[in-house]
Image: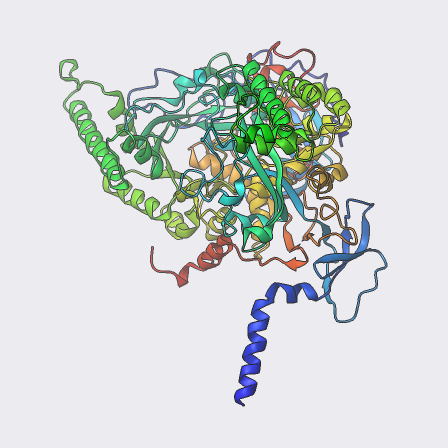
Amino acid sequence: MLIPLFLVVFSLALPTMLHAQASEASHGELRSLAGAFVGDPFPSTYRPFSSQTVLIRNGVVLTGTGERIDGGDVLLEDGRISAVGSGLQAPAGARVVEAERRWITPGVIDTHSHLGVYPSPGIAAVSDGNEMINPNTAEVWAEHAIWPHDPGFGHALAGGVTSLHILPGSANLFGGRGVTVKNVPARTYQGMKFPGAPHGLKMACGENPKRVYGGMNRAPFTRMGNVAGYRAGWIAAQRYLDDWNRWESEGSQPEDRPERNLQLETLAGVLRGEILIQNHCYRADEMAIMMDVAQEFGYQISSFHHAVEAYKIRDLLRDGEICASVWADWWGFKLEAYDGILENAALLHEAGACTVVHSDDGHGIQRLNQESAKVMGAAAGHGIHIPEEEAISWITSNAARAIGIQEVTGSLEPGKNADVVVWSGNPFSVYSKAELVFVDGALLYDRENPDPLIFGDFMLGILPGEVR
Amino acid sequence: MRNSIWVSLGVFAGLLLVGPESAVAQSVAIVGGDVHPVSGPPIPGGTVLIQDGLIRAVGANVSVPSGARIIDATGKVVTPGFLESMTQLGVVELGGEAGPRDVTSEDDRITASFNVLEGINPFATAIPVTRVAGVTRVVVAPAPGGSILAGEGVFMALEGSRVDEMVDVNPVAVFGVLGEGGSARAGGARGAAVQRLREALEDARHYSSSREAYEAGEGREYTLSRSDLEALVPVVEGTVPLVLTVHRASDILGALRLQDAVGFRLVLAGVREGWMVAQEIAAAGVPVLVDGLTNLPAFESLGNRYENAALLSAAGVELVLSSFDTNNARNLRQGAGNAVSYGLSWDDALRAVTLTPAQVWGVHERVGSLEAGKEADVVIWSADPLELTSRAEMVFIRGVEVSSQTRQRELFLRYRDLNRLPPG
């Protein structure tokens, strides 16, 4: 078995983990976009867990902004990163973590997860990711199906994941709202909901919607039907938005108030720039069509997801300022995934497009670092050498940008949320593991002594003796 | 003049005909690499000599014949080709489309006797994608359809343009499923699945000694078609193993009980709760195929964990790592790397993707290690093969250097420079 390669030096006694959700520390607040159209009736109740000042000293720091600091230090204070550099002094009472050979990165962020909505164990009783009854279900919210006790959350945390965007599935043209959560144990999903993070709207191109609805002999039966469906949705949303704007400009008289429509509320939220488009789309030609649809109705696509052919239009994505959230190596499981190549992310990165490595998978989310390593290895075979300090952006800062939380997390910069991972070694080595994971400065995962709370209630008492 | 043209053409045609053989004929010496024969200790700066498709010598002081092609592997790692033990390479082109997919028989008269061979396409695009990543031989296994018995798999090299030149062993095993998968195919209960399997095997044993009566229309009734009985005869005679996919500890023990009662060579696949009954598996001498990349719980694998491979190995179980994947069977090495990360020794992980599977599939005299006399499946890696930042730089299968060409490489090269392409 592995022997820990390091010593953790405490200047104070180890605090009991995870009990009180304490400090009201003023956190990097996002310009709150969430639900601005009608407010958010399901507000976040997340409070950072109790933390202390921590100085992580003398590691290899990858900031997420493209910088690497050998022998670098990161200071976490009041739930935020207060300093990054070399030779930092530990404030009085601070806990000091001697990093030595270990590497320090921002917390990993996954732009595409179905944890909680397709939880483990994966049975029909909790299979809640696809409202497969209508090609437009913009009215449903993934968060209403999140089971906070999905053991996958804890395993993702052990993989360094501190924030994730949970989306509905891809059966529908408009699948519904996605939500960004902090990867923390909680009794309710509201306790995980990332304060101020914008909702996403999941849209889906290609084979899935036409297969699901075509199979029922209804629209969309073809890709033509897919695009007609998007446009019809947006036309209705424009009208709805006009009605509300007119009502507001005419004095917001209660008796004239337009009737609320949950489906159109979500779509109108996109048109007002409050909800970010997260667009499942594999083929390059279809992504270009979606960019035209976005142009026609005046919204921005925040990220294409899966995007196995993104490399074919990496110039268009860069110029359109659209992120591509891709797998390292998934390909060939259907025709629209046939042209997947290992170098997809590398070519996007080289072109200067916003490159994200995502999981869409309860196992993949646990090793987004390894998935990124595959891309680096394949690219190096063609002479494209992507250093660690750049590749780390695929699963941290770029991912934060794709889901609209880059102002507060995704990089090690003073003022940002102290979402930090200490790895046993180079995070792109298959042998390295996240050893300490901090969320808002609180140590939520310690590989030496993991708190069973992070795996939720489901696993409690289910196997005799010590399981993990 | 005319003659010489014909002679030249003749020589050219001859070259075309013997293309692969001419490559085989040349000796290849891989020198200076960090050689991991698996069958013996590592040889830093060792030489692997390949001739006529076979490994001729492996060692620190191998004399290289004059005229041999010399490949400098200094700073690189040399290993045997990796073996993936449960895949559908060649029988699936697109998982989501029924046409290019030949892995499952729903015909209830053709269960154990369904053989994947007829469905194998040597030009399946995933084959080159996999072999350039260092996987040189595979077990192509059927997936269960309506029956707990899925059919027969083959062991084959990922090189060749005809199935008969690729396949080394047919059938290499019969595949089946118990546990939840068995229950779903046997009326909805685990007990019924075990009983069906027991009945099938007992029928096959009875049939094997009563063929004349059967042909004469006498003897007792069997639950299986003649074709399926024939397929199970070598299983009950112990010449072909039966691979059963099971996960729950109690289902694993059930499979061991069945083996004990009926008598056959059992290989367990999946075994996510194997670590909970590792001693029993070891005592039964049953090999296991394990995925190093899974830890999430399902109801039949609540004890699923990354340490499974290491714990089974530590208990003395014959451990084979498998990706259980097709398009990404190349991720076999990621499973091995993660198994190391969770406690398996590096040497044991390498063995679990090379020599041990060769032993389990009965081909260890031919492949699985770098030893003189074995077929030359050799991979030169840029660095540690289990590191994902490493690459297989050269791959030899039966002594022939594998082309780097894959459909994915063609796509990469086409899109390397967007300026050469039509506007977006």
Residue B201 point in image, percent of width and height: 61, 24
Q: Is residue B292 left or right of residue A208?
A: right
Please determine whether, in this image, residue A193 is positioned above or below residue A398: above
Residue A428 point in image, percent of width and height: 62, 41
Residue B372 point in image, percent of width and height: 79, 54
Please determine whether, in this image, residue A435 is positioned above or below residue B141: above
Task: State whether residue A164 appears in this view.
Answer: yes
Q: In which quarter of the image is the C terminus of chain B?
A: bottom left
Q: Which residue is drawn at 79% across and 44% down?
A: B39
Please determine whether, in this image, residue A420 is positioned above or below residue A15: below
From this viewpoint, which residue is outermost toward the top? A461
- Viewer-nearest residue: A21 or B3: B3
From this viewpoint, which residue is outermost toward the bottom? B1
Residue A211 point in image, percent of width and height: 32, 34
Task: State whether residue A468 appears in this view.
Answer: no
From this viewpoint, which residue is outermost toward the right? B61
